Image (cartoon, helix red, strand yellow):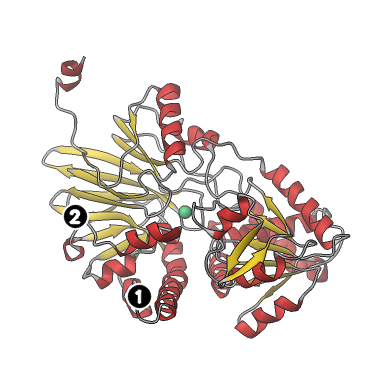
Amino acid sequence: MNLTFLGAAREVTGSCFLIEAAGQRFLVDCGMFQGGMEAYRKNRARPRFDAREIDFVLLTHAHIDHSGLLPRLTKLGFRGAIYATRATCDLLEVMLPDAAFLQEREAERGRGRAEPLYTVADAQATLRQLRAIDYDLACDVRPGIRCRFRDAGHILGSSIIELWLTEGDSTRKIVFSGDIGQKGRPIVNDPTPIEAADVLIVESTYGNRLHRSLEDTEEELAAILNDTLGHRRGNVVIPAFAVGRTQEILHVLTDLLRRGRIRRRFPVYVDSPMATRATEVTLKHEKLVDAETRTLLAWQRQAGAAGLDVHFTESTEESRRLNDIRYGAVIISASGMCDAGRIRHHLRHNLPRAGSAIVISGFQAAGTLGRRLVDGARGVRIFREEVPVHARIHTVGGLSAHADRQGLTDWLSGFSDAPEHVYVVHGEVTAALDFAAHVSARFGWTTSVPAAGQIVSLDAPRAGRISAVT
Ligand code: ZN
């Protein structure tokens, strides 16, 4: 049995792993690369496999860097099932057609020089290939291939995938961490501990960093809101992933209001139709959210005018009207890395305003507009126009959907035996290498940081191999 690292190898985006075992070829995740021309090129490169020969896909969660190339896989002839949790399937219904729409529009803007990566029709076809699987139930997807989805606590529906691959009389257990959430975060549960794996593939987005605590982050956000909406008379613009982050921000704002931490009333505009749909999906899966969130939802329902004053804008007309608001509003919009979507209009209008504040709360990949803002650019280009940056840029770290080094270490502590091999993926090269070194030092496990295209064997080490090495 073999594993090929096709994406998220020494980088954060483009998660995709090919497994050949038990006479089947299948993928774990099929994500889009994000950030700059290099990503554009990789998304369009011919895959290293024949899509028609992929038997099925296991999907850890709905984020585009894990799911965004599924419609392309379908377009290239993949006809198998895509297994994911029910909530992930619901989120994909919102996200994939939207991603396809963006691709179509981008191709139009290029005046037909490039055909879209895939179309809305391709995305619709992909949705018909989805098969929902419940958390925690072992499922034999093919003879010799058993899988189990466990809650990863990253976004709604996110999972760690446990895989048991059987060839002859030998069974190997492979675990894909997917994206691991930070304990105690809003909305989602804590990541499920896993006890054993022969081979572990673990993410490392923040493998060399420690987040600020959620409490500190909430206080920081309260200070920014009181300051900006108060005497600075500006707006607070929050670029946020439509799925996950937007709902967390709403959660934190509601909680701050409930605890009396914000001095004045203010309207919140969620300006992203996809975020609106994703919020609906979250409410539909209320059983999956954590207990604190259920309590807060109950409070918001009872609070009436004292609750959070949220408006979900739909039409571009409504969205455009937000540009006329000079001060006093909170605008949450996508994309989270500022390189597409309505957020760019809000940045264009608010970046030049000294009173406004931009709150960056998520990971910003190299090459994105969000990263340039975080890096302190004095001016940026938006819609082929030079926009000066006078607004204050705040980076708040504690809301990350990813566990930090401590969170990842805590999750790894759940393993009762050492995995034979740990592959560290889904991190920029420094983060991945640092985290691999940390895991080796802390647990004494064998780790490596695979490169894109690398193929490794998942077979049991042959008897005597270790003594041959020593
Ligand atoms: Zn993710």
Image x and y of residue 63, in percent: 45, 59
Image x and y of residue 412, in percent: 44, 33
Q: Answer yes or no: do the residues labelled 2 and 1 have beta carbons within 8 Å?
A: no
- Identify residue type, mark 1: Pro
Label 2: which secondary element: strand
Residue drawn at 41 percent across, 66 percent down: 89
Label 1: which secondary element: loop
The correct choice, above or below, for 42 with respect to 163 in the image is below
The correct choice, above or below, for 20 with respect to 284 in the image is above
Question: Left of 321 or right of it: where is 274?
Answer: left
Name the one closer to the observer, 352 or 333. Answer: 352
Image x and y of residue 384, in percent: 56, 72
Name the one closer to the observer, 386 or 175. Answer: 386
Residue 66's tag is none
Q: Residues within 10 Å of mark 1 (few under 14, many from 20)?
A: many
Residue holding disc 1: 116
Residue holding disc 2: 25
- Location of the C terminus by quadrant is top left
- Identify residue type, mark 2: Arg
**Quarter of the view holding residue 41:** bottom left
The correct choice, above or below, for 283 with respect to 392 in the image is below
Residue drawn at 70 percent across, 46 percent down: 217
Image x and y of residue 148, in percent: 34, 49
Question: Left of 382 or right of it: where is 17?
Answer: left
Residue 117 appears in the figure: yes
Name the one closer to the observer, 284 or 375. Answer: 375
Between disc 2 and disc 1, whose residue precedes?
2
**Quarter of the view holding residue 132:** bottom left
- Location of the N terminus by quadrant is top left
Which residue is the extreme one toward the front? 386
